Image: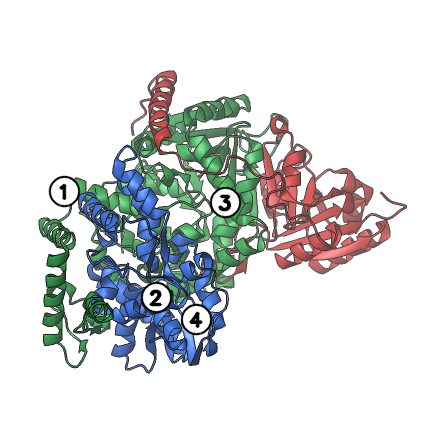
Chain colours: A blue, B red, C green
Amino acid sequence: MITCLADVLRPNVGKATVALLEHFGATVHFPEQQTCCGQPFFNSGVEKQTQQLAKHTIEVFADGRPVVTPSGSCAAMIRAEYPHVFSSSSPWHTRATELAGRTFELAEFLVHQLGVTKVDAQYDGTITYHPACHLRALQADNAVEQLLDQIKGTQCIPLRKSDQCCGFGGSFSVRYPEISGAMVIDKVSCIEETQADTVISTDTGCLMNIEGCLHRNNSKTQTMHFAELLATGLNLI
Amino acid sequence: MNSFTPDPSDTKNAFLNRVRQATVKGRSFRVTTPDSFPDQLAYVGASPSPLLCIKRELESVGAKVYCLSGKTAVQDCLNQVLEKRNPQSVLSWTHPVLEKYEIGRLLHEQHVTLCSPDDQNTDRRFKAEMGISSVDWAIAETGSLIVCSKLEQPTDVSLLPPVHLALVEETQIIPDIFDLFTLLEPQGLPSNLGFITGPSKTGDIELKLTTGVHGPKELLVFLIESSPSSP
Amino acid sequence: MTTDYKKQPHHEFLSASQEALGKASLQIALSRLTDTLAAGNRSAFSALPDSDLLREKARSIKDHTLASLDTYLEQLSDSVISKGGQVHWAKDAQDVRNIILDIAQKKQVQRIVKSKSMTTEEIHLNDALENANLEVIETDFGEYILQLAKERPSHLVAPAVHKTREEIADLLESELKIPVTPEPEAMAKLARNQLRKQFQKADMGITGVNFAVAETGTIVLVSNEGNARLTATIPRIHVAVMGIEKVIPALKDLPVFIKLLARAATGQKISVYTSLVTGPRRTEEHVGPQEFHLVIMDNGRTDILGSPMRESLFCIRCGACLNACPIYRNVGGHAYGGTYSGPIGAVLTPLYDNLEDHHHLPHASSLCGSCQAACPVKIAIPELLVRLRASLNRQKLTPFVERLIYQTWAHTMVRPGLYRLASSFAGWLMRLGASGNWLTKMPGPIKGWTQTRDFRTPPKQSFRNWWKKQKNIRF
């Protein structure tokens, strides 16, 4: 699942994801009817529309294969929320629960499902890692950090207040832009303290938000999705 | 001013009925939690030893600890404390540990007025500059002194004066908060059981730590080691 | 600033939060608060063995208690009475005020000392007491400062955190007519002297209740200053006010919460003073209150108990969620416009007061989950906020335009062809308005984004177009 944000705003993430999955031995299918997991609707409490999108997504991914997505928040939406979107007596509830059972964020899929323990990747430079908030809901168990550790040549500088939200929060950044702005400014100042070349994250939303502020600051720090970093390090893209 | 009070039992029954209805309805919204929990969950205990542990904890919360062994050492130390702080009057418990070290006599010799638990003069009690007590228990895990109120152990002794001196014998030390609750008899609780963990603190101004806004500004603890001759 | 929001028209979160964002001294104070206390919470929990499981245990105790709340409240009442105390049942704020005024009148009370109690804040008790010509003094140092300033608390544990030391010194000098240097030590000493006199004169002491043990009729008071202990000991009458959710079943349940509360709130292993109060003084005692009154209050909690928002009643009022929350960190407590602020306040204020007036609060969150991660009883606050958002929609409290936007947007998203068209068009439009690859100004409702950051325009080729193309080449 490419996620609507990555599809439109950062397609390179998708290319990297496909390349990585194929590199580690998976065959990748991309159901072209997919659109959006429905999280923005769920988060805004629009129940009817959430169900519409959930049903669409369930139908699109109904072939029983594991669903992998380069986004902690989309994976969390399906895993943690889809079963609750429908009443327990509805057949959609069963289908939602079934889909939830085989949906994974990319890093956790590589580490826990494909059993990737060693990667022979090289990427020279300093990085710092911003963990996306939704990884908490997934209890993804540091899969991202485990993979980042494996990349030779990168120096990973700890990010101060790393677990503090970047301020995106979907519609939150549109409804409360001043508060969201203050949060991203805080996040970016912690990033700039590290003086890292690149800041890494697992969510396109976070990256979009952070890079917008970095760019406004004329900062030298670039942003990269975790998938892009790993795929580049493996010379796949 | 409205001083109307309806029949108490009606109010109580109506209240509990409303709670009952909501309670039943609310059972549909229970959360999932584990069925059972291990017995020793979050038991910290006292390491390396109760005496060393409690000393470390007491000091970390800002108490001043005197490690003493034997009656002479205790008495000398008390005299030094009294000389240094020079209180005019002192609130005190009546307690076997205080009697054992003859605290009353020492105070008398130093011309310090002793307000015993019998002394009910509020002005005198409020003016006292030091409070001397023992403890019912002392918890090594956190450095908490447990003081139970009773006639001979008025609560204000460890609360009103700016300095509180507590005599703690090694045998009174228990390892963990959970141990205290194993020892407490649910139907035998005093009117006031206090955990005292250090001198009174506030961070209300810019989070800057300050002592002594209400409770004692200083907590002094005599930690009295058990020796073979004195149990 | 008198923030008696209940008497004022609908409190405006937007303007209050914007004002807060612009106040440098507040930003410094909040930074200090969150850095210190949130870090304390995290390190204290990681230092306690099995803290995660202990939090689950506390959560399960709360859940179990609420599932038989009527039984436990009745047991609590019987226990308190058996220990010589008196129990009063208050349906709402007005009842609590009347009960206390009634006791005051019957017992010739003129002067009252109070220790910090958010429950009494919630019901505006002080105003009612003062209107009845009773003298009321807040004894918690932070609350005492606020009482002089005529302000409401902005944080659960450090209520005056929004004030600088200079502001406090000025306040003390002007109200007490006694000069004092803006050093915390000096100000604490001044407060001690002033407040000690009040304790000696007081007829009644009013406290809240951190926990109430049904088995033994014990109420538990937690403080660092010792004022709660003084309030429950010196005056001849002690009145304790509790919400129904404060009860726990048995004495053996108490250490679970004692081990969690201070760690969650400030990172301490335990607060300086934890007092277990069981009835008034015994007949033979000379020190302690002669009368103990427990006021058990509903004030909307039964409505919450029987609703999907029931979990919010697990709250033990530690303030950990405030310290962890990046929104609280930026706007402070007053912006929330209610007794309770921060994440739990965003849930409780719409429930205790009304959703319409506080329609901003459920949305003023990025749902990051830091609150839930810090909470000693693991309340799923983000989930509760989403439920409130859904309530707003169901009650049609969301603006029509917004509902239309979501409907149209969803309509597009379930039609892949329409989605492709719409996203291509949006991308084209953005590239048109950009300089290079970046938009520095966005129009209308999304212009707020570009106040602080730029927006990278979508590339010409989306992922699915790339996929389609390379698939055709491949096969």
For the residues marked 3 and 4, what is the alpha-carbon distance in whole angstroms?
28 Å
Q: Is residue B50 found left or right of B143 in the rendered image? A: right
| Quarter of the image that includes the N terminus of chain B | top left
Res. C352 in view: no
Query: Looking at the image, which is closer to me, B93 or C366?
Result: C366
Which of labels 2 and 1 is toward the front? 1
Q: CA distance from mark 1 to mark 4?
A: 42 Å
Mark in the foreground, 1 or 4: 4
Mark 3 vs mark 1: tell me if same chain.
yes
Amino acid at circle 4 = Leu
Is circle 3 on the same chain as circle 4? no
Label drawn at residue C55: 3
- The residue tagged 1 is C396
Question: Which of marks 1 and 2 precedes in the sequence?
Answer: 2
User: Does dot 3 land on a helix, a strand or a loop?
Assistant: helix
Measure the C-alpha gap from mark 3 to mark 1. 37 Å
For the residue marked with disc 2, what is the amino acid?
Answer: Gln
The chain letter under disc 4 is: A
Is residue A54 positioned above or below A29 on the image?
above
Q: Residue at x 71, y 46 (%)?
A: B113
The answer to which image quadrant residue A27 occupies is bottom left
Residues at badges 2 and 1 in contact (C-beta under 8 Å)?
Answer: no
Name the disc covering residue C27, or none.
Answer: 2
Give the camera-side residue of C141 and C32. Answer: C32
Look at 13% across and 53% down and name the residue there: C415
- Under circle 2, the secondary element is helix
Residue A127 x, y percent position in the rendering: 42, 76
